[in-house]
Image (spheres, rainbow, N blue to C red):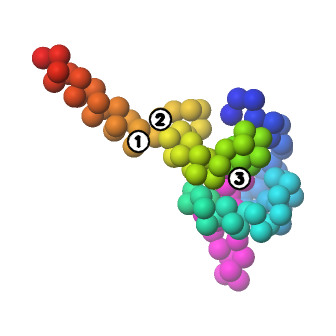
Amino acid sequence: MQNDPHSDIKIPDKLYFKIGQVGEIAGLPTSVIRFWETEFSKINPKRSSSGQRLYRKSDVELILKIKNLLYDKKFTIRGAKKHLGSYTDGNKFSSATIEELRQELISIRKILT
């Protein structure tokens, strides 16, 4: 993400992270991370046999991106959800956005023919 102050945060090269480790990396209380799980369906940690949350590196990166949107760019949770739903890494369009664009282009083509 461009101008992301969290992009320089080094995430250890591990397969899974416990919630406390994610909190340390992101500088967030674990309660905030658990709350964001309820608000952002893309944060979906695995569970160990004992029920402990296990986050992948991609989950940690997403949490850092959400933190940037909410704390630094002052998005609302709703705005951050919309932003994350419309874009993926590299600012490529999501499949839903591509489908909307495709339908719009079909409509324009019909008008022109």
Residue type, label 1: Ser
Residue, far left: 113
Q: Mark 1 — residue? A: 95
- Determine the image quadrant of residue 38: bottom right
Task: Check disc 2 and report its element: helix, strand or loop.
Answer: loop
- Is 34 on the left or on the right of 93, as rendered? right
Name above or below for residue 83 compared with residue 45.
above
* Residue drawn at 59 percent across, 58 percent down: 40
| Badge 1: residue crowd in 10 Å (few <14, some 14–19, many ≥20) | few
Earlier along the polypeptide chain: callout 3 or callout 1?
3
Residue 23 is left or right of residue 16, and the answer is: right
Would you say 94 lies left or right of 54 here? left
Toward the viewer: 55 or 31?
Answer: 31
Magenta segment boundaries in residue numbering: 44-63
- Which badge, 3 or 2, comes first in the chain's sequence? 3
Tell me if label 1 and label 2 are in contact, CB under 8 Å: yes
The x, y position of residue 39, in whole percent, is 60, 61
Which quarter of the rendering shows the C terminus?
A: top left
Residue under numbered circle 3: 63
Residue 29, image x, y percentages: 83, 63
Q: Which residue is situated farthest in the bottom direction here?
A: 50
Q: Is residue 72 magenta?
A: no
Element type at marker 3? helix
Q: From mark 3 to mark 1, how far is it between C-alphas?
A: 22 Å
